[in-house]
């Protein structure tokens, strides 16, 4: 039996306006486009806006119905992107486990890892061997020598110029442009906290849709929050729907 359930036609109608325009897109032509991909920001949080119990701790918030929603969204994006903090903390699979999803339906996992901190033996790599997911792309800062070993497994290393502050920082527009140049036309950004908070505070114009699952629980003060450094005006085109015990809100960010 599949790990997730099929969504109802009402669920699909609810999500329709927020998924990438032409549905499933799996062209991986190099240099396909200089246009930025359709970019969705998607995560699950508690009633107090937290996304994991503590830094570095994988925390299941979505119930079965909203988990199915996440996998339906993965089916409709060319790529799923997470920061290296999430890759290390969660050891995620980053594949699509929606009923009927085959290898050709899988999104490209992308890990933003400017200092090449992520290992090569994660679940996402194991699934490549089993034919259940695509080889991940790891975005590493140009000239990072630790990245040399990363490319030797079932991982492709892409390099990008990083601005150097306390730590190397990629401009999100450059990240999206580099994915577009490799044929990615839609990307689902799942987290973690640093990525979500940076995009919400500083890069709202790059986000085409926001889909947040709110689970009916509180994680408390020590938990990791999805909370940008500055306030963000209310979303527009907002719709809510209940998926099992969770509420899902979709909308667009004010520019
Ligand atoms: N509930 C949910 O839906 C989700 C929850 N999570 C949770 O979030 C937590 C992880 O969050 P967090 O620790 O903030 O980690 P992130 O996944 O946000 O990764 C942060 C790291 O990614 C790199 N990074 C992020 N943005 C950029 C950029 N623009 N340019 C270059 N590098 C960048 C940096 O790496 P470096 O430090 O090497 O410079 C940074 O420290 C985990 O506990 C996880 O369980 C994650 C996803 C979804
Ligand atoms: N939608 C959602 N709900 C939760 O409760 C979560 N914890 C997450 N986390 C994100 O999903 C990744 C795990 O994916 P796999 O199931 O291993 O494929 C995790 O890394 C977060 O990005 N998301």
Image (cartoon, helix red, strand yellow):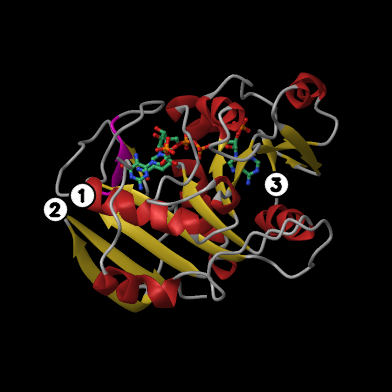
- Whether disc 2's CB lies below 8 Å from ligand 2 is answered no
Residue 136, visible in the rendered structure: yes
* SS state under label 1: loop
**Position of 35 compared to 7: left or right?**
right
Q: Which residue is mark 3?
A: 170
Query: Above or below — where is 34 with respect to 218?
Result: below
- Whether disc 3's CB lies below 8 Å from ligand 1 is answered yes
Q: Which residue is mark 1?
A: 215
Q: Position of residue 18 (x, y in %)?
A: 43, 72
In the picture, the quarter occupied by the N terminus is top left
Q: Position of residue 168 (x, y in %)?
A: 70, 37
In 3D space, how far apart are the residues under numbered discs 1 and 2 (Cα atoms)? 7 Å
Q: Which residues are magenta?
A: 46-53
**Label 1 with label 2: CB-CB less than 8 Å:** yes
Closest to the observer, 57 or 6: 6
Q: Which residue is mark 2?
A: 245
């Amino acid at each position: 039996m599949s790990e997730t359930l099929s969504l109802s036609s009402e669920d699909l109608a609810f999500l329709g306006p927020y998924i990438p325009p032409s549905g499933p897109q799996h062209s991986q032509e190099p240099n396909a486009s200089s246009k930025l991909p359709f970019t969705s920001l998607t995560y699950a949080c508690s009633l107090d806006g937290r996304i994991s119990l503590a830094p570095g701790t994988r925390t299941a918030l979505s119930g079965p119905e909203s988990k199915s929603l996440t996998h339906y969204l993965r089916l409709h994006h060319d790529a799923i992107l997470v920061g290296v903090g999430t890759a290390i903390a969660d050891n995620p699979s980053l594949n699509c486990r929606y009923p009927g999803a085959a290898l050709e339906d899988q999104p490209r996992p992308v890990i933003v890892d400017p200092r090449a901190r992520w290992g090569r033996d994660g679940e996402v790599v194991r699934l490549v061997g089993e034919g259940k997911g695509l080889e991940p792309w790891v975005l590493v800062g140009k000239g990072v020598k630790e990245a040399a070993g990363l490319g030797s497994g079932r991982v492709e290393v892409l390099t990008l110029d990083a601005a150097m502050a306390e730590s190397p920082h990629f401009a999100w527009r450059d990240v999206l442009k580099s994915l577009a140049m490799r044929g990615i036309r839609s990307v689902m950004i799942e987290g973690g906290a640093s990525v979500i908070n940076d995009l919400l505070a500083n890069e709202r114009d790059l986000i085409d849709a926001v889909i947040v699952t709110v689970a009916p629980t509180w994680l408390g003060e020590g938990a990791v929050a999805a909370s940008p450094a500055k306030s963000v005006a209310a979303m527009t085109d907002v719709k809510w729907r209940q998926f099992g015990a969770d509420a899902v809100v979709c909308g667009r960010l004010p520019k």
